[in-house]
Amino acid sequence: MNLIPYIHSTDNVSWFVDDLSSRIVAQTGIPSDRFHLGKLILQSLKDDPDFVLQIDGGTGQSETNKSVLQRSIQCAVSLTELGLKKDDLIVLMGYNHLDLAIPLYAALYLGLVIFNVNMEMGVDSLEQVFASKKPKLIFSQSKKILDIKNSLKTYEGDVKLVSFDDNDERDVLNFSELMNGYKNDEAIENFKLRFDKFPTPTRSPLILTPIHWISAGLHFVFSPILRYTRTQSSKPTTREHVYHLINTYKPTHLITTTPYILALLENRGQCDFDSFEFIHVGGCPLTKDVSDYLNLIDITTQKDITEPNIQGELWLKGPTIFKEYYNDPENTKAAFSEDGWFKTGDIMYRDENYNFFFVDRVQLLIHYKNYQISPLEIEKVIRQHPGVLDVIVTSVTDVQREELPCACVVLKEGHRVTEQEIKDLVKDSLSDPKQLRGGVIFLKEMPTTPQLKIDRRKIKEFVINTVREA
């Protein structure tokens, strides 16, 4: 890939957003409106009404900016009629259908607080979330309404429920009923497009994660602003369905996890990946080895790291960093330094040119004696073995309360590898504190979360139970 056009394209996007935000500030006279996502989205939807903003590959339906603008305005007015006001909190729980973004944009117009919730949450977890966040309105699929009602039995506030699909509950609004509250095409202003060629960073990303994950949430927010078409699906993202989405809609961008991209590539003959311009892989350790508002901090001394190639925790500060965990002062205090820097929890290092490289998560570090050991470093060594398909390093605790590195290994089909081989490979490559004193456990496959990330919690529990039974 040629780097120069990519940088130029990125600059074009930056200039465009500056122009968009400047037009909005010129209209309102409010300088901070350049950061107002609701106003940025509203103006962007007006700028190009015929642009196809979103596609549901599960149903084959698509929707233009004009339709999204009309429906989101209808939804915003209906929410106002229901009594919602600035800083009230709404919950979004839904599949990636075309209706999901409508209350999201409406809430951004009105200055509501949006809390995206995992559809897989059980009653107990929902009860804790609702008690903490105190929502005024909850959007959900009908299949989840009963769980939501059960979780609200001890809730003291007044909360309204809206079902995206049809339901038989008398006290639950259907989304279609909510949307009947306001219809007026004259409320939408026409705007002549000022660019012959729009500096869109990518034509069409494929969204496989639910909206409560930032990899999906960012696309929902920025697709109308930067004018690219989201391809998403209201159906479960099985491997076969994802192949269908890729072959049918030819997406150009994908954000996914290491195990999921490996799973997709296993049967590459069923899918044409040539349409992709970028595939970003994250959420799990990778096999391959911003300077503005950035800081690296030694996690032991809490002092700045000023030299290159030294690992530390990444801290951020700037106008777009989130303010707080909603209604959670304890976690908010822990997430920020006393002088306002956000602690990302990511261990990184930079080179002499201020390129930053991810190492590991602070919470995953293994503490052995006076050493802080990165599981990723050990995993990188073990993956060099020709018989290893995947590996996760966790720890077990001995009687002295020391954390001992333990490797969970998935072998390639047809390969036989012994525990001692893995231990010897680590011994030959890494220092004494990083040796596999907790042993090696062979698994048939890695457990994953519904969001396709490797479930380290389950692996940790499995390792603890295995050692306990031994």
Image: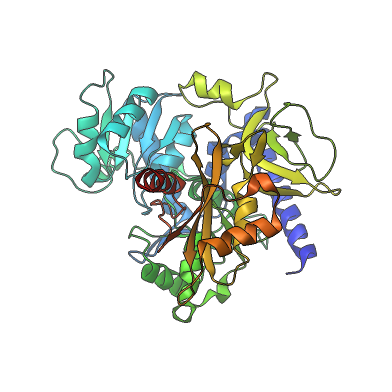
As drawn, 430 above or below 124: below
Residue at 85% of width from left, 49% of height from top?
A: 353
Residue at 22% of width from left, 46% of height from top?
A: 143
Residue 40 in which image quadrant:
top right
- Residue 256, percent from left and from top: 51, 58
Residue at 76% of width from left, 68% of height from top?
A: 2
The tally of labels here is: 0
As drawn, 464 above or below 261: above
- Residue 90, percent from left and from top: 38, 32
Report whether 302 appears left or right of 262. Answer: right
Residue 311 in which image quadrant:
top right
Report whether 76 appears left or right of 27. Answer: left
Residue at 62% of width from left, 30% of height from top?
A: 28
- Residue 323, percent from left and from top: 58, 26
Residue that sits furthest to the bottom in the current view: 269
> Which residue is at the front of the view, 233 or 398?
398
- Scheme of image coloration: rainbow
Question: Can residue 190 be seen in this snapshot?
Answer: no
As drawn, 327 above or below 27: above
User: Which image quadrant: the N terminus?
Assistant: bottom right
Question: Can residue 436 be seen in this snapshot?
Answer: yes
> Which residue is at the front of the view, 346 or 424?
424
> Which residue is at the front of the view, 175 or 428?
428
